[in-house]
Amino acid sequence: MHPLDLLMATDLASRAIHIARQAGFKPMAVAVLDAAGNPLAVLRDEHASFLRPQIATGKARGCLGMGFGGRELARRAQAMPAFFDAINSLTGGEVIPVAGGVLIRNGEGQLIGAIGISGDTSDNDERCALLAIEQCGWVADTGDQPAG
């Protein structure tokens, strides 16, 4: 499979915002990063607050930097707050360890990028990411172990 590109990232971000609107969630911003952590698409619903794009980017960047989804990041941040304080010191505060950051994998399980969404509750942010990733034919990695 090809790496994540601009058109794919823009499609993914647009789908996530559309899903949020259809569900009646609060206005959101979405950041899609490639596997190296470079932003490919950052979209903000025109009604989302001005900090939402930075928060969304921090959710995605944290997942890529640590190698697991936002749910696992949140668990580790809660268990090791001093470690995550150090990480945020190293990154200038660019890691936001909560749900709503999701790694994106292709069908073979290879990491192709990450998405971060901010605007509603972390659970609703993540729900939009999961549905958008599924619609694009990729596999979402939230940091939780798959059932089964």
Image (cartoon, rainbow, N blue to C red):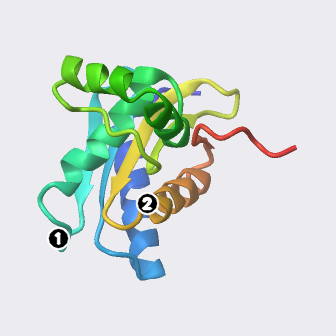
- In the structure shown, which secondary structural element does the residue marked by tag 2 occupy? helix
What residue is disc 2 on? 125
In the displayed structure image, the side of residue 83 where residue 130 appears, left or right:
right
State whether residue 120 is above or below residue 90. Answer: below
Rendered view: 74 above or below 28: above
Sequence order check, earlier mark of 1 and 2? 1
x%, y% of residue 4? 44, 33
Classed neighbour count for the residue bearing mark 2: other residues with Cα under 10 Å, few (<14), some (14–19), many (≥20): many
User: Which residue shows up at 65% across the image and 41% down it?
Assistant: 144
The answer to whether one can see residue 35 in this image is no
Does residue 78 appear in the picture of this structure?
yes
Name the amino acid, label 2. Answer: Asp
Where is mark 1, residue-wise? 46
Q: Quadrant of residue 98?
A: top left
Residue at 50% across, 23% down: 67
Q: Residue at x 28, y 41 (%)?
A: 57
- Mark 1 Cα within 10 Å, few/some/many (few <14, many 20+)? few
Front residue of 51/114: it is 51
